[in-house]
Amino acid sequence: MEFEQLKDKILTLFREDQEFRYAIAGLLGWEEILRRLDRHEEELSRLSRETAELRKETTELRREMTKLRQDMMEGFQLVHRQLSALGARWGIMTEEAFREGLRGLLEKELGLKVERWAKSDEGGVVFGYPGQVEVDVAVGRADVYSFKRKAEFYEKVEGKKPSRLLMVTPYAEEEALRAAKHLGVEIYTRV
């Protein structure tokens, strides 16, 4: 048995076995044993207080970290919402400015009529399910097909075929350009 194990065993016996305590007291002297026992009890008491204090601090730290994490998530969500709102607002303003500029150019310079067109498609002709249909921003092949279906829906609802199908976009994928050519849609974009 190692020294520490022996020491622990002796201390345990000393605490739990009265006869053993008396026997040791006779060997070492009662006062010396009580002094050592008091010193160990004081040390255990101090360690117990420190452990309890550490537990309280750890619990408080966990509580603060949870609150900080919640505050950070709320802050990130707020920033995200504000950036989204700003982006949406900027996008709407930019789209409106572009639309008005294009309207002015086409109506005043070329004598064409430009109008914003939106209708309810209860039969699901354009999207395959009922929804609001309006001609808007397009960049991909699917957008070109959607635009063509919107033109067909317009012809059905209004009873007149558009003279030309024009799309203006700052960017169009190669596949969108090929689809437009196949469908008879003119795309104006930067090359």
Image: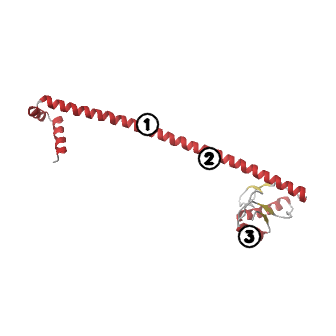
Q: Earlier in the sequence, mark 1 or mark 3?
A: 1
- Which labelled disc corresponds to residue 11? none
Against 160, is 21 above or below? above
In the drawing, what numbered circle is on residue 178? 3
The x and y percentages for residue 10 are 16, 39
Mark 3 → mark 2, Cα distance in angstroms: 37 Å
Say which quarter of the image contains residue 187: bottom right
Q: Amino acid at mark 1?
A: Glu
Residue identifier under label 2: 80
CB contact under 8 Å: marks 1 and 3: no
Q: Which residue is mark 1?
A: 60
First along the sequence among labels 2 and 1: 1
How far across and down, in percent of the image, does residue 190 sit?
75, 63
For image coordinates 19% across by 44% down, the residue present is 4
- The answer to whether the residue labelled 2 contacts the one labelled 1, judged by CB atoms less than 8 Å apart, is no
User: In the image, 150: left or right of 29?
Assistant: right
Q: x, y (%) of residue 62?
A: 44, 40
Q: Residue at x 32, y 33 (%)?
A: 49
- Horizontal side of residue 158 vs 129, given as left or right: right
